[in-house]
Amino acid sequence: MAASGVICCIGGPYLIYYVTPTEEELFKRYNPELQRRSLENRRGKQEDFDNFVNRLKEASRSDKPIWTVMEREDENKRQLGIQRLIQETRDAEEAAKKQRSEIKSSVT
């Protein structure tokens, strides 16, 4: 009975370790197109992850919980995006008014 327990406790994880392929083996199994795309996207994904980790480090310096700081930061970014969109819309409207006035003045 003890022997079967040892076999399950030690042999099970070893079997999973033995059967599971490494990242390099999985990458070699990709077709060439996927390998190329994976290599192209690797740098961008690494930069995104680094930015995320840096944001977490900054948020952890605060006395407040990380998720609260991250939510506030996301809300600020969203507000800035909305303000930028509003400004772009105003600029487009002004450009359209200017074009209309130029067209009216050229027609008459």
Image (tube, helix red, strand yellow):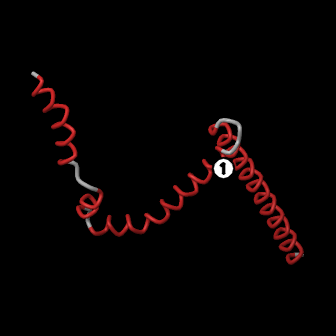
Q: What type is the residue that disc 1 sits on?
A: Glu
Q: Which of 83 and 15 is in front in this view?
A: 15
Residue drawn where x is 81% and y is 58% of the image: 90
Q: In which quarter of the image is the C terminus?
A: bottom right
Residue that label 1 marks:
58
For image coordinates 70% across by 36% down, the residue present is 64
The quadrant holding residue 106 is: bottom right
Percent position (x, y) of residue 96? 80, 65
Q: What element carries label 1?
A: helix
Within-10-Å neighbours for mark 1: few <14, some 14–19, many 20+: few
Nearer to the camera, 10 or 26:
10
Left or right, 105 with respect to 47, comes to right
Q: Where is residue 63 in the image (x, y as percent from the top left)?
A: 71, 38
Residue 83 picture location, percent across and down: 77, 52
Residue plotted at (65% across, 35% down)? 65
Residue at the limit of the structure toward the bottom, as seen here = 106
Could you say which is closer to the camera, residue 74 or residue 94? Answer: 74
Whole-percent x, y for residue 88 in the image: 76, 60
